[in-house]
Image (spheres, rainbow, N blue to C red):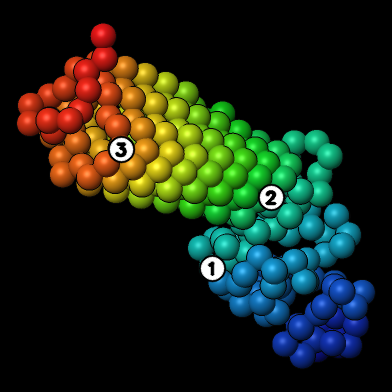
Amino acid sequence: MKLVRFMDDAYQGKASGRRLKTRQGDMIFSLEDLADQVGEKPSRAAVEEFVPEDNSQLDLLISADPGKKYRLLWGYLSSLAAERSAAPLVLPSRDYAGLELMRGTILLQEAGSHVGMRMKGGKILVQGKAGDYLGQEMEGGGIIAAGCRDYAFRNMQGGYGLVKGNAGKFVGLGNRGGRIVVLGSCGERAGWLMRSGSLYVRGDAGEYLGILMSGGRIRIRGTAAARAGWRKKGGVIMAGSFGPEAADDVLAMD
């Protein structure tokens, strides 16, 4: 059978551009098919319009390796699959898992970057360490991870994040709400430009804790390194002890 004939049969005579609409009963066979419809950087609403109603088709798309080209598409699909699942959904370690998640639970052994980005509800549980930008711009729900790299919960607006181990640099950068708990230590510039919300660190914090913050509450059980509260405009910073050049209005805990 010629390739053209094969493709026509496979796509039900609609192989031109492979523009298949599941809302009309057709099938999306691959992430490439979906990208033909919505582009490589779509909105969640656009993906929802064409996502397969058949869970077996959705599972097939989730099992595909998106590479860098289709990782946003895969991220939306991972959230839609979790929202449909009655049980926690186990996913491979990939970037953008749980993108704009609204409900349901996602389980990850490890986590790539941008996990839980813009999530509004549900839970993401990472048994190992997460990459950069964990929970970025999240508005609700909760994330629990064993550890994470840099920029965790950046521009957070709501929800909670729990890091059982250590966190990297820039935790809670630009936060406008939500709660962050780090049971280990965190790197430099945690709470940078923080406007609201709370950050609790059981261990130590790196240099420039709360730099340029204008609101919110930071509490460090251990030691805050040099220049804590530098150019702080508002909010509260407390620590067990402070390094040199701390701002005058930071507070030491008993």
For the residues bearing labels 2 and 3, Cβ distance under 8 angstroms: no
**Residue in the foreground of this view, choosing between 60 and 157:** 157
Q: Which residue is mark 3?
A: 235
Q: What amino acid type is highlighted by mark number 2?
A: Met
**Where residue 249 sits: x, y (%)?**
17, 30
Secondary structure of the residue carrying tag 2 is: loop
What is the CA distance from the residue labelled 3 to the residue labelled 1? Answer: 41 Å
Q: Return the disc, 2 or 3, that comes first in the chain's sequence.
A: 2
- Residue 221 lies, in percent from the top left, at 31, 17
- Residue 69 got which mark? 1
Element assignment for label 3? loop
> How far, Cα to Cα, is label 2 from label 3?
30 Å
> Can you say whether 241 is above or below 19 in the image?
above
Picture coordinates of residue 237, whole percent (x, y) = 27, 29
Q: What is the crowding at mark 1: few (fewer than 14 residues within 10 Å), some, or many (at least 20)?
A: few
Q: Can I make out residue 93 in this image?
A: no
Name the amino acid, label 3: Gly
Circle 3 or circle 1, nearest the eye: 3
Depth check: give the residue in front, 181 or 252.
Answer: 252
Compared with 189, 94 (above or below) is below
- Give the mark, 3 or 1, whose residue is nearer the N terminus: 1
Relative image position of residue 8 (x, y in whole percent) = 86, 86
Circle nearer the N terminus (2, 1): 1
The image quadrant of residue 37 is bottom right
Q: What residue do we see at 60% from left, 33% from top?
A: 125
For badge 1, the amino acid type reads Lys
Badge 2: how crowded within 10 Å, few (<14), some, or many (20+)?
many
State the residue position of label 2.
Answer: 102
Q: Nearer the viewer, mark 2 or mark 1?
A: 2
Question: Position of 126 compared to 254: left or right?
Answer: right
